[in-house]
Amino acid sequence: MFSNSFFHLHTLWLFTVSDIKSVIVPETILGVTSALSGPFLTDNDAPDFSEVLSRTPKVIFWNWLNLFLFDLCNQSVTQSVVEDSVNKSWRAIPSGRITATQTRTLLLLVIPAVYLATLSLGGTWEAVTLMIGTWMYNDLGGADNGVITRNLLNGFGYICYSSGSMKVATGFGEHNLNERSTWWLAMIGAIIFTTLQMQDMPDVHGDAKRGRKTIPLIYGDWAARCSIALPVVAWSLICPTFWDAGVIGYTLPLAAAAVFLTRLFMFRSVADDALTWWFWCSWLSSVYILPLARLYGV
């Protein structure tokens, strides 16, 4: 009985494990730091540090629930099974732990469960909007409908993850986000739209097999790397400027960008790009903490 329970829990874990670094970790950092920034992004003029930190598990859980729903849908689509058989054969479906049909049946339970959970956690509007985006991305083929459509949907998705994380961390039913948060969320969406093609670099073989049109496959490796590098440098300057940051506020994203870009251009194999993707996630997290730089004047 114990071994069966562990098997099923491990199967569920395999659906989301590869996205923890790109969604759950940075979005939790964003939510907590945004809540701690107080009046710069919320209507709470004096947030209590320990109180905000105590909501961290809720932020993590909110992100995992919504990510789990997305991954169930995404990884059960026929084209994704084909891609994962090449890029991530250890995932739940290509490894034979669960079938695509069983996964779609599980979605019938997960969708209402996520909705009901957000009624308590907060971020219900964002969760429902993510469900619509998930349908457009996977079932309507938005993920395979060209680079612009795919990045637009991804940018929109990250706005929802970010907004939901901020609301949960700020305190559902206690405080709200302010007008400046709208601009910050729009900026986050633009960052994702212009740089998320980094995730396509280590996936070129699987993307080619499923027929997905990505920048490295359409325009070549060098053009793809430049299309990532230029906006990363730009956002590393624009975001600290938006927050009127000091020296440390500029140094953090620029230093993270420098390390990321060094790897991007010097280490160019598929295996190297898989590790460089982690450095992109770290760079994104360095941008996400900038509200604290403004709060502390650094």
Image (tube, rainbow, N blue to C red):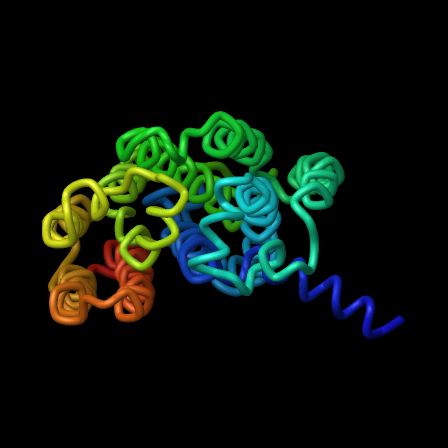
Residue 13 percent location from the top left of the image: 62, 62
Q: Quadrant of residue 275?
A: bottom left
Residue 132 percent location from the top left of the image: 53, 27
Q: Nearer the viewer, residue 32 or 89?
A: 89
Q: What residue appears at the point 70 percent right and 41 percent down from the top-left corner?
A: 101
User: In the figure, 298 relative to 115: above or below?
Assistant: below
Left/right placement of residue 174 relative to residue 233 reads: right
Q: What residue appears at the point 81 percent right and 74 percent down from the top-left corner?
A: 3
Left/right placement of residue 101 relative to residue 282 reads: right
Among all residues in the image, which is located at the extreme bottom? 3
Q: What residue appears at the point 45 percent right and 56 percent down from the top-left corner?
A: 32
Q: Quadrant of the N terminus?
A: bottom right
User: In the figure, 126 relative to 100: above or below?
Assistant: above
Left/right placement of residue 221 relative to residue 33 reads: left
The answer to whether residue 174 of the structure is visible from this angle is no
Q: What residue appears at the point 16 percent right and 55 percent down from the top-left corner?
A: 245
Residue 140 percent location from the top left of the image: 49, 25
Q: Nearer the viewer, residue 231 or 10?
A: 10
Q: Quadrant of residue 282?
A: bottom left
Callout count:
0
Q: Quadrant of residue 288?
A: bottom left
Residue 71 percent location from the top left of the image: 55, 47
Left/right placement of residue 25 relative to residue 256 reads: right
The answer to whether residue 17 of the structure is visible from this angle is yes
Q: Quadrant of the C terminus?
A: bottom left
Among all residues in the image, which is located at the extreme right? 1
